[in-house]
Amino acid sequence: MENTNGNVGIAGMGFYFPEEKVDTHTIKEEANLEDWIYENAGINTIYKPSDIDRNTHMAYNASVEALKDANMDASEIDLIVVCVFRNDYWHWQMSTWLKDKLKAVNADTLEVCGGCSAHFFSVETAVDQIRGSDDINNVLVVCSERFFGYGWPTFLSSGGQAIVLKRNCPQFRYLGFYTSNLIRYHENAYIKYGGTAFPFNEETVWNGVGFQQNVEVNADIYFEHIKPAFFDKFKEITDKLMENTGHNISEVDYVVSIIQQKKFDKKILEAIGLPDIPCGLEYKAELGHFSGADTYIVLDKARKDGKIKKGDLILSFTIGGIAWCAELIEY
């Protein structure tokens, strides 16, 4: 059953998006994509950052909006958790920068580095910190990524997302979390050099300035072990989450997931046995994929448009690498 040692909910949400939006058809033409690939993606526009739209800039502005939405001063924040994949700094946490910029004088800071699932773990960690400590009541969780032009063909976007988690908050109350992974197949994709096992040396071959050209991919592992189980894993985590929280899948009113190809949501809903449930798909074509915080952008839009009502159960999905994650939220 759910942990009742202090109910935790979302007191406020804030977002920052660059001013310029780019028609993805232009990118399609530049990349010489086949029509069927472009149509399968189903993303019409994405946000293009300007020179000032660095990760820190977007994180700060999203945080300000989240605090406003929560009607809270930065001094009331006890912990700042920043989830980031590409930080502005090599050796300095963005969370400490954000604490100083916001004047969140009473906040501790924590950085969670990783891909899409890292945001899920950031939120789960924040909830656990509130539930497990008498001294932590308000946590700011921030994700900011400048992904435009990085990676292909998922039409990656750019922006900042922030949520304020509060003890005994009556809205968007977290009922439970569940994660399942295929870590035994981690060699599906990895970077050989740069760690303690294979440190850089004079003989190291490194392609380009980033890391993406240096990822070693084992396609056989993916097609043999991961792809066949991909959507079945959503069923697994849904069943376990429902079992752990004492709820039934039939009680779910709304589903949100990260932004991927347009058929992604349909396949998830079919896998979990809710093929006709609303899922915010109408918002995704004009956004593109930001990070694991995609789900909160969709959730905020559904809230503002009246697509969800008080008491609704919301099932939220994230996937990052080979980790499948689900959370159950009561609005």
Image: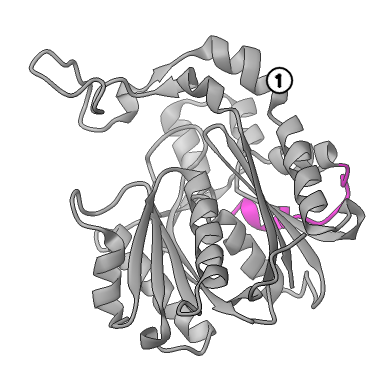
* Quarter of the view holding residue 81: bottom left
The residue under the point 52% across, 45% down is: 117
- Which residue is found at the position 37% from the left and 47% from the top? 85
Does 253 sit above or below residue 108?
A: above
Q: Is residue 114 visible?
A: yes
Instruction: Say which amino acid is labelled 1.
Output: Pro
The answer to whether one can see residue 12 in this image is no
Query: Is residue 279 in the magenta section?
Result: yes
Give me the residue at 73% from left, 62% from top.
2
* Quadrant location of the N terminus in the rendered image: bottom right
Q: Is residue 135 magenta?
A: no
Considering every residue shown, the one lying at the far top of the view is 220
Given residues 206 and 184, the one toward you in this image is: 184
State the image coordinates of residue 238 (x, y, percent, origin top left).
77, 45
Q: Secondary structure at mark 1?
A: helix
Q: Which residue is mark 1?
A: 228
Q: Is residue 295 above or below residue 259?
A: below
